[in-house]
Image: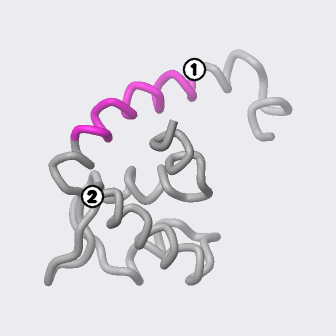
Amino acid sequence: MAIFDLLGRRWAMGIIWNLSKGPATFRALQGCCETISPSILNSRLKELREAQLIDRSLDGYHLTSMGEELFLLLKPFGAWAINWAQQIGPEIGSR
């Protein structure tokens, strides 16, 4: 349940999703996650580092091997979610 708690926090999965494309600096992540506040981003990065899903290097933040494995498990949910949202309609899917 701990992983579901972590992933259910605002922007946690968005950060993982963006880092799946490669390393990113704090500012680059903030640009990708347009509505995220600096304090929330900082908190999520700290939590994801403590969970050993991401790490920081000279290139910025990046997924660890466990983070990459988690992303591969989450990736099918992205396709499923798009299909689900199309089937239930925009008024329900945007909630």
Q: In the rendering, at what x and y percent does residue 38 appear?
A: 56, 83
Q: Residue at x 16, y 78 (%)?
A: 57
Task: Give the dominant element type of the magenta stretch: helix, strand or loop.
Answer: helix
Task: Find disc 2 in the rendering and name its residue.
Answer: 52
Image-based side of 66 in relation to 42, left or right = left
Residue 5: x, y in percent?
56, 45
State which quadrant residue 52 falls in: bottom left
SS label for mark 1: helix
Label 2 environment density (alpha carbons within 10 Å; few <14, some 14–19, many ≥20):
some
Q: Where residue 18 appears, x then y in whole percent?
A: 37, 57
Tag 2, which secondary structure? loop
Q: Position of residue 92 (x, y in %)?
A: 82, 30
Label 2 with label 1: CB-CB less than 8 Å:
no
Q: Is residue 89 above or below residue 41?
A: above
| Residue 51 inside the magenta-drawn segment | no
37 vs 87: above or below: below
Name which residue lies at 48% across and 75% down: 31
Residue at 47% across / 27% down in the picture?
77
Q: Mark 1: which amino acid? A: Asn
Task: Identify the mark at residue 83; answer none if there is no mark.
Answer: 1
Question: Range of the magenta residues?
Answer: 69-82
